[in-house]
Amino acid sequence: MTKHTDSILLKSLIQLVLLMVNILSVYVLFRGHQLPGGGFIAGLMTGISFILLGLAKGWEALGKNLPVDPMRLATTGVALALGSGLLPLLVGGEFLTQYNWHWEHFPMLGELHLGTPLLFDTGVFLLVSGMTVKLVTVLVRSSSGLAPFTAEEERYYASILEEPIEDKARRREESDGL
Amino acid sequence: MPGLAELNHFPAALLLGVIVLPVLFVPALLLFGNRLGRYTGLLALLAPLASTVWLTCLLREHWSSGTVGTAAIEWVPFLGINLALVLDGISIFYGYVILGVGFLVCGYATFYFSRDEKNMGPFFAYLMFFMTAMLGAVFADNLFSLFIFWELTGVASFLLIGFSYEKRTSQLGARRALLITFSTGLCLLAGFILLGQQAGTFVLSRIAAQGGTVLEGSGWLAPVMLTLIMLGAFGKSAQFPFQFWLPGAMAAPTPVSAYLHSATMVKLGVFLSARMFPIFRDLDLWLPLVAGVGFATMLLGAFLAFRSHDLKEILAYSTVSQLGFLIGFYGLGGSEGVRFDLLHIASHVFYKGSLFMVAGIVDHAAGTRDLRFLGGLGRRLPLTAVAALLGAASLASIPLTTGFISKELALAGLGDLWAEKGALALFFYAAVLLSAVMTVAFALRLFVGAFTGKEPADNPFHPPGFWVQLPPLALAGAALGFGVFPGVLGEWLDHFKVPGLQDSASGEVALWHGINRELLLSAAAIALGILLHGWARKREWHWNRVLSLQRLDRVFDRSVDTLGYVAKRITLALRADWPPAYLPIVIFTLLAFVLSAFVVHRAEFGEFVNTERLFDPWRSLVAVMVCIGLFGVLTLRRWTAQLVALSVSGFFLTFYFVLYKAPDLAMTQILVESASVVLVLVLIARFSTGSRAGTRFEFRWNAKQVTRALLSLGMGGMATLLVVFAELNRHPDPMGYHMLALSQPLAEGTNAVNTILVDFRAFDTMGEITVLLIATLAGMGLMVHYKREKGTDRSAFAAPGFLLGKRPERKGKSE
């Protein structure tokens, strides 16, 4: 896989596409409780839109220009879902009880339906989008000769003392006499 | 035993306070640990002190001798799993032992460590964690809460043994202790579950109140229960054949050995025997199992202690021996109950605690714990020598110590047993006497070897502080004081009698029972012990050769390593890194199971009544398109082309979902398909251009190809069969319609797929997203490994990545 595409069309349109896909994905997320959609689908849409961005602009650039580490986004998502589940405990409900509010005539917006399911679904959305972007970015970088992680990230995901997996296996096998 | 109605209930939170108080100190200990250094111990000291005061106040208010108070905090009420707590004699006795010794050990540890010792915060935090777990275990009234606290003490023990984690002995010792106590702990859990099922309740005091009647009608299950439960107790208390983990645990700092591995945690097996006594004592297996193993361990432990030469190892084996006696003692208990069991335990706590602390001081002062290189410390450490003398005297059951009282009473009890059981008692008698002789010998050696005689020439003496010598002196003083005035101790312990366990007729505890058989036997044991010591001293080779029995730990370590080796062998044999090798096995197993189920149940298979449902023009068209895509996968040559063909099938599958009016599924399918195509393309890019070009698929009539073809056809046939079967045997009232109907009224959403995901089955979703996160993190960990390897010696593209197995080139050739 090349570092970035040669297609001028994709390069020039990517920002517009990114914007539109993400507006759509937020819309899909919001309407999920009533109409086809939801956090999982919206998360995949956002994830794929960023893969597209990576293909157009190059993966090196993508890593530098993301404002938040996608992994952090994914963790926030799980925390958000868990938090929305723990919230009812404060008011005496059971874990993961969902509450909904409905307004027939909300000022400016008209009919509005909101509830804690949206909070939960947003958690799913963040997790799925973050996870997709991170996994694909790391895999693509490793297979196209780029460093998949920054030095800081390496400290997050592995202990300093750990050695490369194949060296370790080889050493073990030698010591076992295999 | 008071009936259930008489149980005196009290606020559970009060007792819970006693239990959790130590662990509440943990944040403060961790916070100030670095600044305070070893003096963190003085802060930790407050925890057992506060807990003791709290417990005493609680007892004044809610407890008077004999009555049982229980309290429960609900946890999983429908399974009977609750945090139930009990206040009865035995739990209170153990509670005071834990807190009292805990107090002394915190004080001792403060001055035991050197001033610049690191990690004092975590050390005392582990100690507090242990204290809470141990208190929880003895006050637990529910089998499950007892089990959980039981295992938590094992975790604490693991952390404390491994405190000097860079030392190899610590690592091995901690691993042994954890594996032994946890694997036997699982037996305990199984035994508890069986017992609870049989009794219909998991509340320990209720089971104990019914006594042996609980087991009525359980048949062969009762001995199984007892064996499983006692396996747990034997593992925890280092009884035969698990005796070797305790000396290994001596790699822990000495305060830990004194506290966990002699005074408290290892007594859990004794505690459990006491708890199980009212339930199982009438079982035929009770005496041979509990008393048999206990007394055999007593003998073995004394023998091993006699043959050891490391101070702490001697004490460890002597603890094993004494624990054997304490457990075996319950095994001998008659129908009226046992007598003086708490006195034996208290006596052991006094002298063993003080001797362990002495061993720690000697280790620090002389730089070694090996008796062969010690001597003459008595002049340099008079205070410690006094503590050691008293401790050793009590260990050897010399008159005027609690050890003597305990031995007298034990022999008297055995004498009664002789009248009852006859020849069987002979074995127990012999075990007690023989181990008494050996105990006298090694107790004498302990004191004489370390504190008298010549000082070794190159002795790097380093004087210990004054304060560190106080706690052992306090415990040794108790052994002497209560030995001179045993009536005080006896009267005090009488308060803790539990009906059903202890004999209600209280026996007099006195120093002088007149000249009787017990006294003569004691005197003979002491005399023989001194002779044995003198004889062994002359022939020192006894202590220079390690017994093969003491090497059981090596055998254990070897077998643990072998387990890893075997697992690796199996993994390699199954070729876990090479799907073409193991997939046929998986598929074959699946086919065998499912198809045989169809053959067995063919009568229920029904007939093809809904044939019109199976043939629909639109769906058939889509199915054909999916098949065309798959045909492309088989016939195309380049990997990329195959991938495109595969995703064509995937996209047609989306159309199938549309035909079923499932827009959510269709959308998910499209998006997942897109994302995975990108992912696989990325992975394909890692292979060399040559292998990516692929080879044309050609069918040959050889065994391999035919087997694979048959397996593939079988898999397809099985899937078809399952679909048809499901279609013909529709559930009359499918769940889905309820979800559809309830979606709007209950979850206030019209999209049933979404309401199921975020509301009805939100807990599942919660679990799934957590798993996704964990999987991603694990993937990141693997990728970090890969990157480093690439950075060192191999180029980016030629490296056979671990992600697709190690043999990509061969895959290209053979397929």
Image (cartoon, coloured by chain):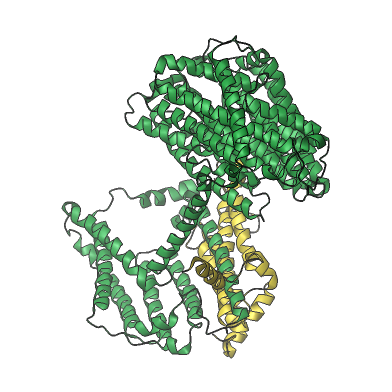
Chain colours: A yellow, B green
Asked which quadrant contains residue B535, the reply is: top right
Left or right: B422, with B401 as reference point: left
- Total marks in image: 0
Q: Position of residue B320 (x, y in %)?
A: 56, 35
Residue B442 appears in view: yes
The image quarter containing residue B350 is: top right
The residue at 79%/44% (across/down) is B38
Q: Is residue B78 left or right of residue A7?
A: left
* Residue B90, above or below B661: above
Q: Nearer the viewer, residue B242 or B786?
A: B242
x and y percentages locating residue B182 in the rendered image: 51, 44
The residue that appears at 54% across and 57% down in the rendered structure is B770
Q: Please tell me which residue lies in front, B206 or A12.
A: B206
Using the rendered view, name the quadrant where residue B707 is placed: bottom left
Placement of B326 over or under B64, stated as above or below: below
Whether residue B87 appears in this view of the structure is no
Q: Is residue B727 left or right of residue B246?
A: left
Where is the C terminus of chain B found, in terms of image quarters?
bottom left
At a point 37% along the width and 30% down the height, the residue shown is B222
Asked whether B803 or B485 is in front, the reply is B485
Q: Is residue B32 above or below residue B206?
A: below
Residue depicted at x 16% and y 52%: B603
Q: Residue furthest front?
A: B538
